[in-house]
């Protein structure tokens, strides 16, 4: 079964900071990342913590508004965001879905990496966990939109480097995403974030 990134913690621990301070701290860390490329490994678990799916691939983001998420194993899928459009392309299904980006703000956690970090507070309530050590920072984001496809997002930094994201959806499923081989603020061509559907591919507009 394919579980889309767009549908991508146990009980949250006691939170140490008020929303305004947490938002400021998160904005400060995200504001240092103008671009990011990394490999990822994504694990999805059901309500009983039984594994449902494991994915591997590569991701690239660039501010403002450019995002690419390429799943390579066990199947191929591309999620590409640029300007006002999000494309989800499934080569094996010969299908490409086109969506307006503004419909995904607050629903697609990874897009916060390419968006305006100063606007996070308008889409999420933000809290910060008490750090285990001074080099670690962990934030909990909950969508303000009651129709969002996930209930909470846990974002973890080591120093100024994002190293993991953890989502919990309304069905009780949990998705853990771990980043490796991370390059922050490297040069990424804008052409990386362009997508033209190949011939003979069904295009679905949403």
Image (tube, helix red, strand yellow):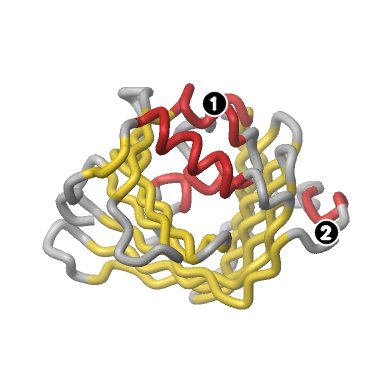
| Spot occupied by residue 131 in the image (x, y as percentages of width and height) | 32, 58
Element under disc 2: loop
| Spot occupied by residue 102 in the image (x, y as percentages of width and height) | 60, 25
* Of marks 1 and 2, the one in the foreground: 2
Q: Quadrant of residue 18?
A: top left
* Left or right of 173 in this view: 56: right
* Left or right of 189 in this view: 87: left
For marks 1 and 2 on the same chain, the one whose residue lies earlier in the sequence: 1
Can residue 202 be seen from the camera position used here?
A: no
Pick the front one: 135 or 112: 135
Report the residue at 25% width, 64% height from top: 45
- Give the residue number, with chain letter if any, for mark 2: 188
Report the residue at 71% width, 38% height from top: 65
Placement of 42 over or under 128, stated as above or below? below
Report the residue at 29% width, 39% height from top: 151
Mark 1 neighbour density, 10 Å: few (under 14) some (14–19) many (20 or more): few
Element under disc 1: helix
* Left or right of 139 in this view: 119: right
| Spot occupied by residue 1 in the image (x, y as percentages of width and height) | 35, 62
């Amino acid at each position: 079964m394919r579980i889309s990134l767009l549908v991508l913690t146990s009980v949250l621990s006691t939170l140490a900071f008020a929303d305004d301070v947490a938002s400021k701290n998160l904005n400060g860390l995200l504001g240092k990342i103008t671009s990011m490329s990394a490999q990822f490994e994504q694990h999805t678990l059901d309500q009983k913590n039984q594994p449902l799916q494991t994915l591997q691939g590569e991701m690239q983001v660039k501010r403002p508004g450019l995002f690419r998420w390429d799943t390579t194993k066990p199947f191929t899928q591309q999620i590409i965001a640029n300007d006002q459009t999000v494309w989800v392309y499934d080569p094996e299904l010969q299908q490409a879905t086109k969506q307006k980006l503004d419909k995904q703000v607050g629903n697609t956690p990874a897009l916060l990496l390419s968006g305006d970090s100063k606007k996070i507070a308008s889409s999420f309530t933000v809290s910060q966990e008490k750090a285990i050590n001074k080099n670690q920072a962990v934030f909990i984001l909950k969508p303000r939109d009651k129709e969002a496809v996930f209930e909470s997002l846990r974002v973890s930094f080591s120093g100024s480097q994002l190293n993991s994201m953890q989502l919990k959806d309304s069905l009780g499923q949990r998705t853990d995403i771990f980043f490796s081989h991370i390059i922050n603020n490297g040069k990424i061509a804008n052409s990386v974030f362009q997508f033209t559907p190949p011939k003979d591919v069904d295009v679905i507009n949403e």
